Image (cartoon, rainbow, N blue to C red):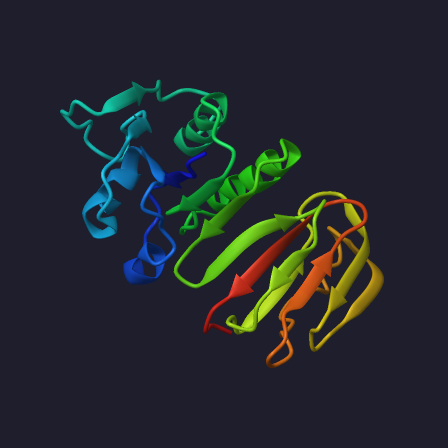
Amino acid sequence: MQRCVIVGGAGIREYQQIRKSLRGDDWFVYCDGGLRHVQELGREPNLIVGDFDSHEQPETDTEMIVLPREKDDTDTVYAVKEAVRRGFREFLLIGVIGERFDHTFGNVSLLLYLDALGIPACILDDYSEMRIVSRETAEVKDDCSWFSLLNISGTAKGITILNAKYPLEDGEITSEYQYGISNEVLPGKTACVSVREGQLLLVKVFGQN
């Protein structure tokens, strides 16, 4: 099954870094203002979704879903739900981490939504990669500068971190106390992160403090 790439309207500066993560058979959904990234990404849309409050509605033969401006779901949330409805079972979200915290947090929450459906998903921005750790052990290679584990939903229990500067065994991280920030993979090793109960947001940071 193809991977679905959702492109939002948040700013992207490191296009080259993003392009390295794209696959030749990815299926692209551009959300409203995300259309401004088409040329730099070098990938045409398979589907366009939006209410076009931040980008002119294009004249195109590409399939397009025009949404009302007053609605419960943002354009990005609608696009993800539509792709799930069409049967996609792997997602990459780009252009979804921006200056507006409310939109950013809502988009990060989409990782929880997809994880609850058993669908792997990842968010890439200019400096980091984000995904949810829940049922399966996650591996973190030593190609990142730091990695953090954040709890954005309930309480995560039975957390184990191996092959890292700050290891952990049977730990617990609550939403109120985020102590899993800025860990490091031991040189030449691959860190392993597992959670017995709950969900954690794994953030791999590349070259930033």
Picture coordinates of residue 187 (x, y %)? 60, 81
Which of the 4 image quadrants contains residue 54?
A: top left
Front one among 138 and 6: 138
- Residue at the location (53% across, 74% down)? 145
| Residue 13 in sight | no
Front one among 192 and 176: 192
Picture coordinates of residue 130 (x, y %)? 54, 53
Front one among 204 and 43: 43
Quick check: 179 above or below 4? below
- In this rendering, would 204 be left or right of 51? right
- Residue at the location (74% across, 69% down)? 162
- Residue at the location (40% across, 51% down)? 99
- Residue at the location (75% across, 58% down)? 177
Which of the 4 image quadrants contains residue 139?
A: bottom right
| Residue 130 in sight | yes
Q: Quadrant of the N terminus?
A: top left
